[in-house]
Image: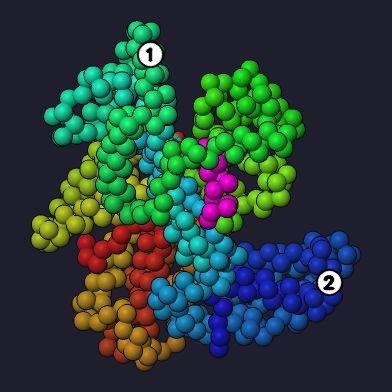
């Protein structure tokens, strides 16, 4: 029996077909299908009741007609029941579960299924994430964009989108004037050797302080900036050096987090592309001069009607807005982007809104196709005191130190739980668990809200944590090891008998809902939905494993239980990889 990957979409399609056959009014008939409370089945469709009300029909009678008109792919795979006043409940039949488990046997099969079920397939998505400013180290404030952006990129790409990962670094700020000023006077070459970013940060602070205290320094620093912007060879070389060193340091963090960008087109890349923006926005009448600056008002907006979007500063220099507009045009024209996803913290909400509003009008006036624009915003990482997380002395926590501490803390856990493993193995596990815990703690929260950073909660084998899931993965691998079998060996499951016990069936029903978790995470770009599913799946697995012995003598029973183990493993591993985590075979 051919089995759909995603039953929700298959049922929705079937309902649409049935409705068409019964000539229901498609403008008011909704086919939304959702996951049901497991006690009532697997899926539920609630659209008939409001339809019957509006068209003054008996809802149960209508429901009976619709059920009778459902195509056989759904009636073969689901028991359909009319519940209450006219809800439709769909319960997957054991045969359909069986077929699903036989069909989606590896990551490639899951991905093929995901692509077929996703509207995003084949669309070009530029994902703009991480994007720190150069000359500074990445700190905890840079964690979320990197982690969430990577997970979103992987989820989209798994669903068939063409994903372009673009690191829009801030490499052209006005800060470079002061930094170059100090670099030329106060550079400590030894410090530059040992920890260049630390040295650049020190120089920047020194330049800043000197400029604050002495007007003449400020003038000189401005001069350095003008020289840089007009292509002075020496200043350009210093600037280049600073950026190279910064990118090298960023790369070390990205390597730990499993991030690989396709492009790093920072603000400086758009230097020669902003003139066109000024010209087009002026010519279309969207931008106007105001006190020497070029600005865009949005008269229809309560705040932006008086608080304009400044796209060129009064000294003639480009700013964050000019480069972002140029970036968007480049993404549209050069990458042919269907969507641009900005993974930026929620405090830049106004900037994004003004950018999007401006782009909408500008693209309309110039007959361009506007990509889907989305500010995938997120809250702040808080300390236990509910204030943005800082060191004891009130400084930003460097990401490098944070990841280091995560690995050390995980090492302590590993030493306690896995003392029998070799030191090398323990170190590897500590890295995966430590970094994975930081990533997962960030991802399992609804990204819109702030969250409190707690080492004890995140590096724990209990609760919705990376360690819990990584442990579940390792445990399933060890089941196979003990039986001297491989989860990838499909032949081993051929003798499997039909699913029988309630815990086997409950686990199979959960597994077959991976597609829904995936699409509910990809649609609104919310990875926490997938986290929750994986956590629940691991719980369902524990229930099964406690109730149903796997290593039984009856080979047909053993095979069907091993197959459940293999599929749980596949989905846990695939899911964790989609979130950006690495997994372990042993823990
Ligand atoms: N560099 C910026 C910052 O640190 C973030 C850039 C985000 N991307 C963008 N296209 N604006 O705040």
Mark 2: give few (<14), some (14-19) or many (20+) Cα within 10 Å.
Answer: some
Give the structural element (helix, strand or loop) at label 2. Answer: loop
Residue 218 tag number:
1
Q: Which residues are magenta?
A: 323-335
- Can residue 391 be seen here? The reply is no
The residue depicted at 64 percent of the width and 42 percent of the height is 359
Frontmost residue, 91 versus 402: 402
Q: CA distance from mark 1 to mark 2?
A: 73 Å
Is residue 291 on the magenta stretch? no
The residue depicted at 81 percent of the width and 67 percent of the height is 26
Q: Please, is residue 15 above or below residue 537 in the view? A: below
Frontmost residue, 10 versus 534: 10
Of the numbered discs 1 and 2, the one sitting upstream in the chain is 2
Q: Quadrant of the N terminus?
A: bottom right
The residue depicted at 70 percent of the width and 36 percent of the height is 283
Frontmost residue, 209 versus 403: 209
**Left or right for 51, reference 360:** right
* Image location (x, y in percent) of residue 203: 27, 23
The residue depicted at 15 percent of the width and 34 percent of the height is 194
- Can residue 342 be seen here? The reply is yes
* Image location (x, y in percent) of residue 540: 41, 66
């Amino acid at each position: 029996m051919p089995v759909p990957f995603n039953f929700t979409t298959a049922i929705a399609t079937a309902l649409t077909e049935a409705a068409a056959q019964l000539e229901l009014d498609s403008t008011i008939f909704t086919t939304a299908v959702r996951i049901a409370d497991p006690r009532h089945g697997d899926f539920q469709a609630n659209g008939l009741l409001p339809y019957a009300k509006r068209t003054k029909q008996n809802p149960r009678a209508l429901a009976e007609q619709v059920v009778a008109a459902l195509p056989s792919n759904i009636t073969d795979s689901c028991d359909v029941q009319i519940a209450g006043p006219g809800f439709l409940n769909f319960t997957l039949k054991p045969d359909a579960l069986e077929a699903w488990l036989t069909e989606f046997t590896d990551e490639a099969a899951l991905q093929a299924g995901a692509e077929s079920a996703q509207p995003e397939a084949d669309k070009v998505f530029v994902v703009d994430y991480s994007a720190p400013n150069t000359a500074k180290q990445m700190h905890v404030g840079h964690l979320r964009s990197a982690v969430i952006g990577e997970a979103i990129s992987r989820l989209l790409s798994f669903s068939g989108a063409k994903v372009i990962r673009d690191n829009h670094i801030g490499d052209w700020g006005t800060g470079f004037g002061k930094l170059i000023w100090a670099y030329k006077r106060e550079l400590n070459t030894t410090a530059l050797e040992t920890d260049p970013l630390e040295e650049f940060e020190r120089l920047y602070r020194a330049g800043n302080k000197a400029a604050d205290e002495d007007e003449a320094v400020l003038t000189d620093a401005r001069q350095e900036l003008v020289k840089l912007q007009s292509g002075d060879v020496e200043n350009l070389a210093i600037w280049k050096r600073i950026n190279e060193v910064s990118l090298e340091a960023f790369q070390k963090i990205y390597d730990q987090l499993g991030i690989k960008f396709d492009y790093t087109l920072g603000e400086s890349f758009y230097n020669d592309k902003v003139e066109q923006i000024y010209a087009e926005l002026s010519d279309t009448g969207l931008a106007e001069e105001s006190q020497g600056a070029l600005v865009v008002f949005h008269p229809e907006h309560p705040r932006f009607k008086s608080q304009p979007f400044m796209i060129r500063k009064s000294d003639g220099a480009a700013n964050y807005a000019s480069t972002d507009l140029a970036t968007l045009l480049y993404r549209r024209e050069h990458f042919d982007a269907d969507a641009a996803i900005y993974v930026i913290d929620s405090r830049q909400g106004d900037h994004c809104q003004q950018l999007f509003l401006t782009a909408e009008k500008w693209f309309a006036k110039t007959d361009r196709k506007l990509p889907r624009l989305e500010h995938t915003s997120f809250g702040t990482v808080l300390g236990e005191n509910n204030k943005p997380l800082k060191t004891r002395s009130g400084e930003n926590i460097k990401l490098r130190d944070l990841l280091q501490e995560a690995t050390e803390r995980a090492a302590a856990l590993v030493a306690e739980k896995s003392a029998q493993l070799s030191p090398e193995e323990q170190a590897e596990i500590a890295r995966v668990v430590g970094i994975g815990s930081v990533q997962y703690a960030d991802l399992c929260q609804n990204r819109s809200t702030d969250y409190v950073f707690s080492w004890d909660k995140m590096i724990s084998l209990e609760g919705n944590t990376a360690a819990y899931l990584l442990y579940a993965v390792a445990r399933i691998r060890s089941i196979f090891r003990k039986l001297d079998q491989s989860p990838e060996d499909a032949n081993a499951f051929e003798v499997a008998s039909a699913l029988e016990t309630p815990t086997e069936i409950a686990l199979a029903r959960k597994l077959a809902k991976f597609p829904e978790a995936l699409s509910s995470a990809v649609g609104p770009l919310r990875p926490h939905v997938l986290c929750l599913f994986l956590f629940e799946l691991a719980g369902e697995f524990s229930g099964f494993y406690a109730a149903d012995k796997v290593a039984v003598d009856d080979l047909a029973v053993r095979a069907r239980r091993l197959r459940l183990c293999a599929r749980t493993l596949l989905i846990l591993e695939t899911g964790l990889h989609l979130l950006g985590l690495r997994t372990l075979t042993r823990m």
